[in-house]
Image: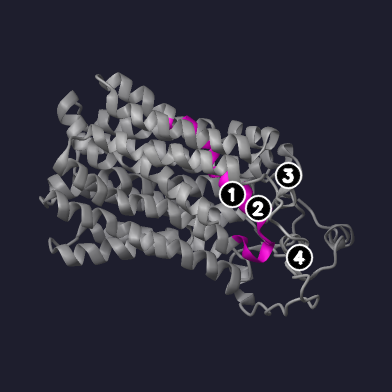
Amino acid sequence: MSLIFIVYTVEYADRANIGFALPFIQKEYNLDNTQAGLLVSLFFAGYAIMQIPAGFLVNKFGVKITYSLGIFLTAICTGLMGMVNSALHLKMLRTLVGISESTVVIGSTVTINNWFPAKEKGTATGIFLASSNMGPLIVPLISAWILMNFDWRYIFILFSIPGILLAIIWAVMVCNHPEQSKFVSKEELKYIKSGVSSLNNQAREIKAFRFYWLDRVIRTREVADLTSSKQCFRCWDIYGAALGYFFMVGTVGVLMSWLPKYLLQEKGFSVMHSAMLAASPFVGTLIGNLLGGWLSDNVLGKRRKPLMMVSAISTIVSMNLIIHAPENQWLLTALFFVTGLLLALGYSAFSVYAMGRVNKATYPIAYGIINMGGQLGGMCLPFIVGMILDHYSWNMVFFALSVGALLCLIFVVTIVEPRPRDADAQPAGSASELHKDSGLRV
């Protein structure tokens, strides 16, 4: 989990570092806001179109090969972005960064699905997605230092070095499954598979879920696992989660790529003050992802929809508050922090949701569909923001994001919340009997 956290921090830094370089790239290559938005979006275009193919690649070749190769190629393409001499080359490499990184996110979630018991998957996914906010958190300060001492090209060159080293470390240290690792004991393996430690054969006492009214609100149902890619492609719940994720990832993509320009040019802050303000939403999202994963597992009884809905509603409110944001630096910092915190509470739930709807073998496909929806949002919304800025104002940008959050809420409401099966306390083999005896339906 620690290695995944470090890897994904670096990977997200590689996609976020363009935010501070963007104004200087626009000036050097004479790009308008629409063209700048396209440059940002090309990463997500390559990333999105490769999500489902990446799921099949991870299924076929395993995480060890595809994950290591993805980290290595992402680093190489990022470094090359600092050596180009035309906007066309920048666009090509930005797309290749997205294509290369496609196996990393799926490999991370597949590793969590394989290496953690069910009762810890929400928390583990929250930690994983917190690393996606650690990247944008550290990027502004590092980028500001680089710009004060070098030029924008060194942002990409210097950020590529850690990825090359991490690709080698992952390839050497991590196996596809815990049973393949010589460092995993029999007791650990039993705990991973059942959630019950071999050192204590007594099943843990499962806390009763007391918010039964919530199950009516979020449409909790008994459903069978999806066990094939065909079932995934025919299931509305997977598509509904993907469409909701479209707007969540798109909003984060806009904050990550356009917020520095908003602070530098619209609000008139200095480079270092802009860096501090641009980092504040991601301090919030870092905490929100950790808190959201824990709440989903321990308070909400593995129910994922409630926090998805909270994130959508809070984003509607916060985007409208930003329209009337004060000029005061500290009040702006607090507003951006709260915006990131509440947005992130349900962010990890989109990833974990698929774990409750499919079996382990089918999970890469289901998550590939959901994440493709998210990354299409990351592709479309920054580009749309560029077009809005060429014709309207920043207020229209934040209003459009609030409308997107409303659509996210609508899509999330339509999907079914699978009733959690307390597999942690069941004897081996009882899950299949539950499916057989309960008349569960897809």
Query: In the rendered image, which residue does mark 4 sit on?
Result: 187
Q: CA distance from mark 3 to mark 2?
A: 10 Å
> Residue at horizontal 61%, vertical 77%?
211
Instruction: Residue 426: name its quadrant.
Output: bottom right
Query: In the rendered image, which residue does mark 1 sit on?
Result: 109
Mark 1 near mark 2, Cβ–Cβ under 8 Å? yes
Query: In the rendered image, which residue does mark 3 sit on?
Result: 361
- Assign a secondary structure to mark 1: helix
Of mark 3 and mark 2, the one earlier in the sequence is 2
The residue nearer to you, when weighing 430 against 192, is 192
Q: CA distance from mark 4 to mark 3?
A: 23 Å
- From the viewer's perspective, is residue 431 above or below residue 378? below
> Residue at horizontal 32%, vertical 28%?
81
The part of the chain drawn in magenta is 97-121
Give the residue type that dot 1 points to: Thr
Give the residue type that dot 4 points to: Glu
Does residue 104 show up magenta in the picture?
yes
In the image, residue 16 lies at what x, y percent? 34, 43
Q: Residues within 10 Å of mark 3 (few under 14, many from 20)?
A: some
Query: In the rendered image, which residue does mark 2 sit on?
Result: 113
Using residue 422 as the reference point, say whether residue 277 is left or right of it.
Answer: left
Q: Residues within 10 Å of mark 1 (few under 14, many from 20)?
A: many
In the image, residue 57 lies at what x, y percent? 64, 32
Q: Quadrant of the N terminus?
A: bottom right
Of mark 1 and mark 4, the one earlier in the sequence is 1
- Assign a secondary structure to mark 2: helix
The residue nearer to you, when weighing 422 against 418, is 422
Give the residue type that dot 2 points to: Asn
